[in-house]
Image (cartoon, grey):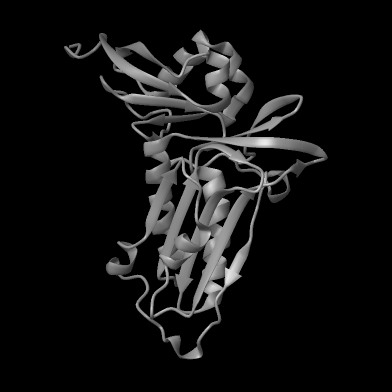
Amino acid sequence: MQSTNDNQKIQVRVLFFGADRDIVGLEELDLSLTSPTNAGAAKEQILTSYPDLRRFGNSLLFAVNQEYAQPDRQIQDGDELAVFPPVSGGSESATETQGRREDQPEHDDAGSADVSSASFLAKDFFELTTEPIDVGAVARRVVLPQCGATVTLDGYAREWTKGRRTLYLVYEAYGPMASSEMKRLGEQAHEKFDIAHLGIVHRTGRLEIGQTSVVICVSAPHRRAAFEACEWAIRELKRTVPIWKKEVFADGEVWVEGSEPPAVAGG
């Protein structure tokens, strides 16, 4: 016997970001689907309507309610779907930001604090801002008496990439999902490294050459863990957090695409 919920029309909201938005020509649209359905079917319906999106191949990302979604993820009435290209990560040599790191002197008597405690984790911060970032002020937010080292990475817009002069950058984020992904990244960092605090502040909007795009600060009882966690965090941020970067040149512009899409839970 067929369920009364079968073959019912449901409405979802679809968001587009970065190069996908440029291809579609829309920031969002309302889409009607036949229930029951899943993320794979919804994505295919969108690709059928906008075939130019297929140029991204398997790297085209899909999210449901601000979470990366497997094709079998069920879609419900009122869900928020998002279609976007790979985030603006890629290899170290392909990015338009560079890192500056500062290491405070390590104190041998710093001790081995219980840096994985919930009280420390609760003081982590993950933020998006359209305002200029004060790197020093961000770094001081993760300093604790129990810690002997703070490592700060300052990613900023550089003028030349592969012999081509950049005029300015534009960063765009899928705000709610970017915030939740940064928080998840922070939780993983505490599981992997013996650190006390981790903070990330990422700027969006237009950035002039030399302006800071992202600051990652890590404090730990000993500097090695802080360095390792900071290195891991910037790599994962560029791979998984839905933030896109457009580089504007005198003779054109391009969205920077990462080369390694994030793994989806259950995949």
Question: Looking at this view, is 87 or 262 the one in front?
Answer: 87
- Coordinates of residue 213 in the picture (x, y in percent): 56, 47
Which residue is rendered at x = 55% and y = 27% of the image?
Answer: 18
Q: Residue at x 30, y 24 (%)?
A: 79
Which residue in the rendered view is the most extreme toward the right?
163
Q: Is residue 95 above or below residue 99?
A: above
Left or right? Give the position of 41 relative to 93.
Answer: left
Percent x, y of residue 171: 55, 36
Among the 4 quarters of the image, the one containing residue 87 = top right
Horizontal and vertical percent position of residue 81: 38, 25
If the image is split into quadrants, where does the N terminus sit? top left
Q: Can residue 87 be seen by looking at this rendering?
A: no
| Residue nearest the viewer, comparing 43 with 71 | 43
In the picture as drawn, the residue positioned furthest to the bottom comes out as 109
- Residue 68 image-quadrant placement: top left
Res 239 seen here: yes
The spot of residue 224 in percent (x, y) is: 56, 75
Relative to 48, does residue 238 appear above or below in the rendering?
below
Q: What residue is shown at x 41% (from left), y 83% (from top)?
A: 112
Number of numbered callouts drawn: 0
**Residue appearing at x 50%, y 8% in the figure:** 49
